[in-house]
């Protein structure tokens, strides 16, 4: 097997386990807060916990991107994997929200396994196969996102959230060991330039198509993370019972992932025909309308069906954004471009939970769904009105 293909399949498994470990525990943080005695300002605490890791990650990602250019992306994957193993394992023993907050900050500063895998694939895969390879990694993340909530919710219901956190740590360790023993980074030459993160930002600022992608990434990430802190609590209210709250939340959380596994390949094939921009616009539009439509139903069954339909459209968004990063940057800058892309993602992920936590604490939860939908529709407008410029940018980069 060619090295790039072996890397792809090994990292597919690694990303699957890493995504599963994340979704096993992170969506259930609001419920875990209740279990460790946080019964006041739960929504605000939840927003802080979600935002802390993203804030730390936004600061650290450009630094790790430069280190990766100097020492390789494989060492960064190993570092991130061990960090996740340590964070999840220690989380199983926390007794108050301050300890949990500290571990979330540590996670943001040191982790980055999936972005690192995307960067390694993007820089070690033949250019004609990059789109295919990135879509495969996206499917791995989506598949892990399906299994994780179901597995995490089941473990939490049977033996408690602490065991679920410990299990997530084991999954992260498996991903790390796979990288250590089976991934080969063949297309790497250490960077000798005495550049700086400031110069990387200047280079990105001169690339208008890339900046448009980064802005859309931040907006999209913020819109999705706005709803995350309050979604588990909303699901519990709709379900009418807290006895199996974690399992019920896990099932509902998995629905967009199931839709992604089914429909993402179809979006990918269509993107090859019509381009990433059109697919991005349709995905954002469907995601925005689907998010607002979720408040129509007052029962768990109608809500779940709407979540699935939302997933059918939204699964097109992030693969399209990843594809636009590849298409709008030269290969010698692509690794750093993905680092900046991750920073944009983290910035959106930092802002979103704070907005969601504050809105959920002051207004009815339905308000958060409306705001999230409006943000996605705003992203739709940005992607639509700048489609022509992005197309010109892609043509320029390919010539």
Image (cartoon, rainbow, N blue to C red):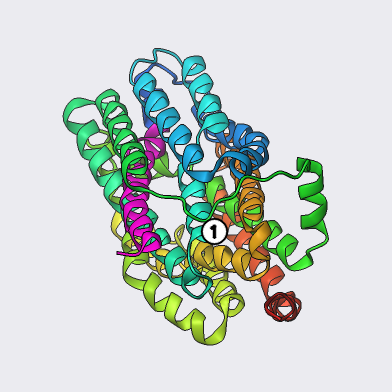
Q: Position of residue 114 (x, y in %)?
A: 46, 47
- Badge 1 marks a residue whose secondary structure is helix
Using a 10 Å C-alpha cutoff, classify the residue at mark 1 as few (fewer than 14 neighbours), some (14 to 19) or many (20 or more): many
Q: Nearer the viewer, residue 8 or 374?
A: 8
Dominant SS of magenta comes to helix
Q: Nearer the viewer, residue 358 or 55?
A: 55
Q: Position of residue 392 (x, y in %)?
A: 74, 80
Q: Is residue 28 magenta?
A: yes
| Residue beneath the point at 37% across and 55% down | 7
Q: Left of 86 or right of it: where is 398?
A: right
Quarter of the image that includes the N terminus: bottom left
Quarter of the image that includes the C terminus: bottom right
Residue span colored magenta: 1-30
| Residue beneath the point at 55% across and 63% down | 322
Q: Is residue 100 above or below residue 238?
A: above
Q: Is residue 182 above or below residue 169?
A: below
Q: Is residue 261 above or below residue 384?
A: above
Q: Is residue 151 magenta?
A: no
Q: Is residue 397 above or below residue 343?
A: below
| Residue beneath the point at 68% across and 64% down | 378
Residue 380 shows in the view: yes
Q: Which residue is mark 1?
A: 123
Residue at far left of view = 158
Q: Position of residue 265 (x, y in %)?
A: 38, 74
Q: Nearer the viewer, residue 282 or 65?
A: 65
């Amino acid at each position: 097997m060619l090295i790039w293909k072996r890397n792809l399949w090994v990292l597919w498994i690694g990303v699957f386990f890493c995504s599963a470990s994340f979704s096993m525990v992170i969506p259930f943080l609001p419920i875990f807060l209740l279990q460790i005695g946080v019964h006041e300002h739960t929504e605000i605490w939840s927003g802080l916990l979600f935002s802390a890791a993203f804030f730390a990650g936004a600061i650290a990602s450009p630094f790790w991107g430069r280190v990766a250019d100097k020492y390789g992306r494989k060492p960064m994957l190993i570092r991130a994997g061990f960090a996740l193993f340590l964070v999840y394992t220690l989380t199983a023993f926390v007794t108050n929200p301050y300890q949990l907050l500290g571990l979330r900050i540590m996670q943001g500063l040191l982790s980055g396994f999936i972005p690192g895998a995307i960067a390694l694939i993007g820089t070690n895969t033949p250019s004609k196969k990059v789109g295919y390879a990135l879509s495969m990694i996206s499917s791995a993340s989506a598949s892990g996102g399906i299994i994780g909530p179901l597995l995490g919710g089941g473990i939490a219901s049977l033996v408690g959230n602490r065991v679920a956190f410990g299990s997530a740590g084991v999954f992260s360790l498996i991903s790390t060991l796979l990288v250590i023993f089976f991934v080969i980074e063949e297309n790497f030459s250490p960077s000798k330039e005495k550049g700086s993160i400031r110069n990387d930002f200047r280079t990105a600022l001169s690339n208008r198509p890339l900046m448009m992608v980064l802005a859309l990434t931040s907006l999209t990430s913020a819109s999705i993370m706005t709803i995350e802190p309050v979604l588990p609590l909303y699901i519990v209210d709709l379900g009418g019972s807290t006895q199996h709250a974690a399992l019920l939340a896990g099932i509902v959380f998995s629905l967009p992932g199931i839709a992604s596994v089914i429909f993402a390949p179809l979006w990918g094939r269509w993107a090859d025909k019509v381009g990433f921009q059109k697919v991005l616009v349709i995905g954002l539009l469907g995601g925005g309308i689907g998010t607002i439509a979720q408040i129509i139903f007052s029962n768990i069954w109608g809500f779940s069906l709407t979540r699935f339909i939302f997933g059918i459209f939204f699964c097109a968004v992030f693969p399209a954004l990843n594809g636009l990063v590849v298409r709008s940057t030269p290969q010698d800058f692509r690794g750093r471009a993905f680092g900046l892309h991750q920073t944009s993602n983290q910035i959106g992920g930092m802002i979103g939970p704070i907005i969601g936590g504050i809105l959920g604490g002051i207004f009815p939860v339905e308000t958060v769904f409306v705001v999230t939908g409006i943000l996605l529709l705003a992203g739709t407008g940005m992607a639509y009105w700048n489609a022509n410029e992005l197309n010109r940018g892609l043509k320029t980069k390919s010539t």
